[in-house]
Amino acid sequence: MKVAISPAEAAALIPDGATLLIGGFMAVGSPHRLIDALVAAERKDLTIIANDTAMPGRGIGKLITARAVRRVVASHIGLNPETQAQMIAGELEVELVPQGTLIERIRAGGVGLGGVLTATGLGTPVADGKRQIEVDGKTYLLETPLRGDFALVGCHQADYVGNLEYSLTAHNFNPIIALAADVVIAEPRSIVPVGVIPPDAVKTPGILVDHLLERAPS
Protein backbone atom coordinates (compact mmCIF):
# COMPACT_ATOMS: atom_id res chain seq x y z
CA MET A 1 0.00 0.00 0.00
CA LYS A 2 1.30 3.44 -0.89
CA VAL A 3 0.83 6.36 1.50
CA ALA A 4 -0.58 9.42 -0.25
CA ILE A 5 1.39 12.63 0.27
CA SER A 6 0.48 16.27 -0.17
CA PRO A 7 1.69 18.35 -3.12
CA ALA A 8 3.93 20.30 -0.75
CA GLU A 9 5.48 17.08 0.56
CA ALA A 10 6.07 15.90 -2.99
CA ALA A 11 7.67 19.20 -3.99
CA ALA A 12 9.96 18.95 -0.96
CA LEU A 13 11.40 15.74 -2.41
CA ILE A 14 12.55 17.60 -5.54
CA PRO A 15 15.71 19.71 -5.15
CA ASP A 16 16.83 22.70 -7.14
CA GLY A 17 18.66 21.61 -10.28
CA ALA A 18 16.71 18.37 -10.69
CA THR A 19 15.85 16.91 -14.09
CA LEU A 20 12.09 16.40 -14.39
CA LEU A 21 10.15 14.40 -16.96
CA ILE A 22 6.65 15.91 -16.97
CA GLY A 23 3.62 14.46 -18.72
CA GLY A 24 1.03 16.39 -20.68
CA PHE A 25 0.24 17.79 -24.10
CA MET A 26 -0.44 21.53 -23.89
CA ALA A 27 -1.16 20.89 -20.18
CA VAL A 28 -3.69 18.09 -20.83
CA GLY A 29 -2.55 15.20 -18.65
CA SER A 30 -0.09 17.30 -16.65
CA PRO A 31 0.18 17.06 -12.84
CA HIS A 32 -1.20 20.54 -12.15
CA ARG A 33 -1.20 20.53 -8.35
CA LEU A 34 2.38 19.27 -8.24
CA ILE A 35 3.48 21.97 -10.69
CA ASP A 36 1.77 24.58 -8.50
CA ALA A 37 3.60 23.19 -5.45
CA LEU A 38 6.97 23.46 -7.22
CA VAL A 39 6.22 27.10 -8.05
CA ALA A 40 5.19 27.76 -4.45
CA ALA A 41 8.41 26.12 -3.23
CA GLU A 42 10.38 28.48 -5.50
CA ARG A 43 12.40 25.72 -7.14
CA LYS A 44 15.20 26.91 -9.42
CA ASP A 45 17.53 25.64 -12.17
CA LEU A 46 15.27 22.76 -13.17
CA THR A 47 15.70 20.82 -16.41
CA ILE A 48 12.31 19.95 -17.92
CA ILE A 49 11.91 17.14 -20.44
CA ALA A 50 8.39 17.23 -21.86
CA ASN A 51 6.41 17.40 -25.07
CA ASP A 52 6.00 21.18 -24.74
CA THR A 53 5.92 24.07 -22.30
CA ALA A 54 2.14 24.59 -22.52
CA MET A 55 1.02 28.23 -22.32
CA PRO A 56 1.48 31.09 -19.84
CA GLY A 57 -0.54 30.32 -16.73
CA ARG A 58 -1.12 26.66 -17.62
CA GLY A 59 0.80 23.52 -16.75
CA ILE A 60 4.55 23.71 -17.34
CA GLY A 61 4.02 27.30 -18.44
CA LYS A 62 3.73 28.24 -14.76
CA LEU A 63 7.25 26.95 -14.12
CA ILE A 64 8.51 28.98 -17.08
CA THR A 65 6.83 32.16 -15.82
CA ALA A 66 8.29 31.58 -12.34
CA ARG A 67 11.75 31.27 -13.91
CA ALA A 68 12.17 27.92 -12.22
CA VAL A 69 13.62 26.33 -15.36
CA ARG A 70 17.19 26.49 -16.64
CA ARG A 71 16.86 24.05 -19.54
CA VAL A 72 14.03 22.62 -21.63
CA VAL A 73 14.06 19.57 -23.89
CA ALA A 74 10.78 19.59 -25.84
CA SER A 75 9.24 19.09 -29.25
CA HIS A 76 7.77 22.58 -29.55
CA ILE A 77 7.43 25.88 -27.70
CA GLY A 78 5.25 27.68 -30.21
CA LEU A 79 2.31 28.44 -27.91
CA ASN A 80 4.35 29.84 -25.05
CA PRO A 81 5.78 33.28 -25.85
CA GLU A 82 7.44 33.43 -22.43
CA THR A 83 9.54 30.36 -23.27
CA GLN A 84 10.50 31.98 -26.55
CA ALA A 85 11.38 35.31 -24.91
CA GLN A 86 13.59 33.68 -22.26
CA MET A 87 15.32 31.59 -24.93
CA ILE A 88 16.01 34.62 -27.14
CA ALA A 89 17.32 36.55 -24.12
CA GLY A 90 19.74 33.73 -23.33
CA GLU A 91 18.05 33.06 -19.99
CA LEU A 92 16.72 29.60 -20.90
CA GLU A 93 18.44 26.81 -22.82
CA VAL A 94 16.06 25.08 -25.21
CA GLU A 95 16.74 21.84 -27.10
CA LEU A 96 14.05 21.21 -29.69
CA VAL A 97 13.60 17.54 -30.57
CA PRO A 98 11.16 16.12 -33.15
CA GLN A 99 8.21 14.70 -31.23
CA GLY A 100 8.60 11.08 -32.30
CA THR A 101 12.33 11.20 -31.64
CA LEU A 102 11.74 12.75 -28.22
CA ILE A 103 9.43 10.03 -26.94
CA GLU A 104 11.64 7.31 -28.41
CA ARG A 105 14.67 8.76 -26.63
CA ILE A 106 12.71 8.70 -23.37
CA ARG A 107 11.54 5.15 -24.03
CA ALA A 108 15.14 4.13 -24.75
CA GLY A 109 16.17 5.60 -21.42
CA GLY A 110 13.39 3.70 -19.72
CA VAL A 111 14.08 0.26 -21.16
CA GLY A 112 17.86 0.41 -21.16
CA LEU A 113 18.61 0.88 -24.85
CA GLY A 114 21.82 2.58 -25.93
CA GLY A 115 20.03 4.94 -28.27
CA VAL A 116 17.61 5.26 -31.19
CA LEU A 117 18.44 5.24 -34.90
CA THR A 118 16.27 7.60 -36.94
CA ALA A 119 16.45 9.37 -40.28
CA THR A 120 14.40 12.27 -38.91
CA GLY A 121 16.52 15.41 -38.85
CA LEU A 122 19.14 14.36 -41.39
CA GLY A 123 20.28 17.35 -43.39
CA THR A 124 18.91 19.82 -40.82
CA PRO A 125 20.36 21.56 -37.74
CA VAL A 126 18.94 18.64 -35.71
CA ALA A 127 21.85 16.56 -37.02
CA ASP A 128 24.58 18.98 -35.95
CA GLY A 129 27.18 17.27 -33.79
CA LYS A 130 25.39 13.91 -33.79
CA ARG A 131 26.84 10.57 -34.77
CA GLN A 132 25.58 9.13 -38.06
CA ILE A 133 25.38 5.38 -38.60
CA GLU A 134 24.86 3.50 -41.86
CA VAL A 135 22.64 0.41 -41.84
CA ASP A 136 21.99 -1.53 -45.07
CA GLY A 137 23.03 1.45 -47.15
CA LYS A 138 20.82 3.93 -45.30
CA THR A 139 22.08 6.69 -43.00
CA TYR A 140 20.57 7.32 -39.56
CA LEU A 141 21.19 9.67 -36.67
CA LEU A 142 22.05 8.09 -33.35
CA GLU A 143 19.80 9.79 -30.80
CA THR A 144 20.87 9.19 -27.21
CA PRO A 145 18.57 8.07 -24.37
CA LEU A 146 16.88 10.54 -22.01
CA ARG A 147 16.22 9.94 -18.33
CA GLY A 148 15.19 12.12 -15.41
CA ASP A 149 15.67 12.29 -11.67
CA PHE A 150 11.88 12.47 -11.30
CA ALA A 151 8.89 11.69 -13.51
CA LEU A 152 5.81 13.77 -12.67
CA VAL A 153 2.76 11.97 -13.99
CA GLY A 154 -0.86 13.10 -14.24
CA CYS A 155 -3.46 10.32 -14.35
CA HIS A 156 -7.20 9.70 -14.13
CA GLN A 157 -7.08 7.40 -11.14
CA ALA A 158 -4.78 5.23 -9.09
CA ASP A 159 -5.41 2.36 -6.72
CA TYR A 160 -3.85 1.94 -3.30
CA VAL A 161 -0.81 0.07 -4.63
CA GLY A 162 -0.08 2.69 -7.32
CA ASN A 163 -1.50 1.14 -10.48
CA LEU A 164 -2.42 4.01 -12.79
CA GLU A 165 -5.19 4.51 -15.36
CA TYR A 166 -5.25 7.36 -17.86
CA SER A 167 -8.17 9.06 -19.58
CA LEU A 168 -8.30 9.41 -23.37
CA THR A 169 -5.75 11.88 -24.76
CA ALA A 170 -4.44 12.66 -21.26
CA HIS A 171 -2.60 9.35 -21.72
CA ASN A 172 0.02 11.04 -23.99
CA PHE A 173 3.63 10.83 -22.70
CA ASN A 174 2.73 9.79 -19.14
CA PRO A 175 3.18 5.98 -19.29
CA ILE A 176 6.52 6.29 -21.09
CA ILE A 177 8.04 8.88 -18.76
CA ALA A 178 7.11 6.65 -15.81
CA LEU A 179 9.70 4.18 -17.15
CA ALA A 180 12.56 6.66 -17.39
CA ALA A 181 13.10 8.28 -14.00
CA ASP A 182 14.67 7.36 -10.69
CA VAL A 183 11.57 8.48 -8.77
CA VAL A 184 7.98 8.52 -10.10
CA ILE A 185 5.38 10.79 -8.51
CA ALA A 186 1.81 10.33 -9.74
CA GLU A 187 -1.01 12.83 -9.34
CA PRO A 188 -4.35 11.00 -9.69
CA ARG A 189 -7.75 12.65 -9.76
CA SER A 190 -8.97 9.91 -7.44
CA ILE A 191 -7.58 6.93 -5.50
CA VAL A 192 -9.68 3.77 -5.54
CA PRO A 193 -9.47 0.32 -3.92
CA VAL A 194 -7.42 -2.39 -5.59
CA GLY A 195 -9.58 -4.16 -8.17
CA VAL A 196 -11.62 -1.15 -9.23
CA ILE A 197 -9.29 -0.45 -12.16
CA PRO A 198 -9.64 -3.33 -14.68
CA PRO A 199 -6.27 -5.03 -15.25
CA ASP A 200 -6.29 -4.20 -18.96
CA ALA A 201 -6.82 -0.50 -18.12
CA VAL A 202 -3.63 -0.29 -16.06
CA LYS A 203 -1.04 1.46 -18.21
CA THR A 204 1.50 2.10 -15.45
CA PRO A 205 1.91 -0.72 -12.92
CA GLY A 206 2.30 0.21 -9.29
CA ILE A 207 5.81 -1.25 -9.09
CA LEU A 208 7.00 1.80 -11.06
CA VAL A 209 5.31 4.40 -8.85
CA ASP A 210 7.11 5.69 -5.76
CA HIS A 211 4.66 8.29 -4.49
CA LEU A 212 0.97 9.14 -4.94
CA LEU A 213 -0.44 12.61 -4.37
CA GLU A 214 -3.44 12.69 -2.13
CA ARG A 215 -6.70 13.47 -3.90
CA ALA A 216 -7.62 17.12 -4.26
CA PRO A 217 -10.12 18.52 -1.74
CA SER A 218 -13.64 18.34 -3.17
Image (cartoon, helix red, strand yellow):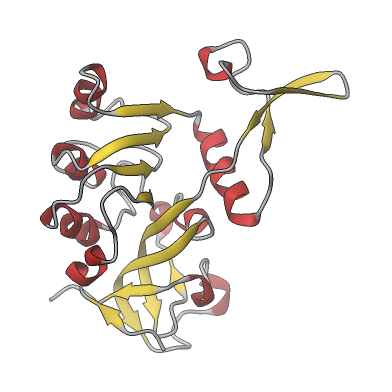
| For residue 63, above or below residue 2 | above
- Give the total number of marks visible in the rendering: 0
* Residue 83 in which image quadrant: top left
Q: Give the residue displayed 14% in from the left and 37% down from the top.
A: 65
Residue at image point 37% right, 64% down? 155
| Residue closest to the far right | 136
Q: Quadrant of the C terminus?
A: bottom left
Examine the image and state in which quarter residue 87 appears. Answer: top left
Residue 19 in the image: above or below residue 64: below
* Quadrant location, the N terminus: bottom left
| Residue 152 in picture, x, y percent from top left | 36, 58
State which quadrant residue 199 falls in: bottom right
Q: Nearer the viewer, residue 178 or 99?
A: 178
- Horizontal side of residue 113 vs 209, given as left or right: right
Relative side of 55 to 20, left or right: left
Where is residue 94 drawn, in percent x and y?
Answer: 35, 28
Q: Position of residue 151 (x, y in %)?
A: 41, 57
- Residue 121 is left or right of residue 136, and the answer is left
Up the image or down, 137 lies above or below 61; here it is: above
In front: 168, or 44?
A: 44
Residue 50: give x, y in percent of width and height: 39, 43
| Residue at the (40%, 58%) spot, across then down | 150
Q: For the point 30% across and 25% down, which residue is it? A: 78
Residue at the farthest top position: 123
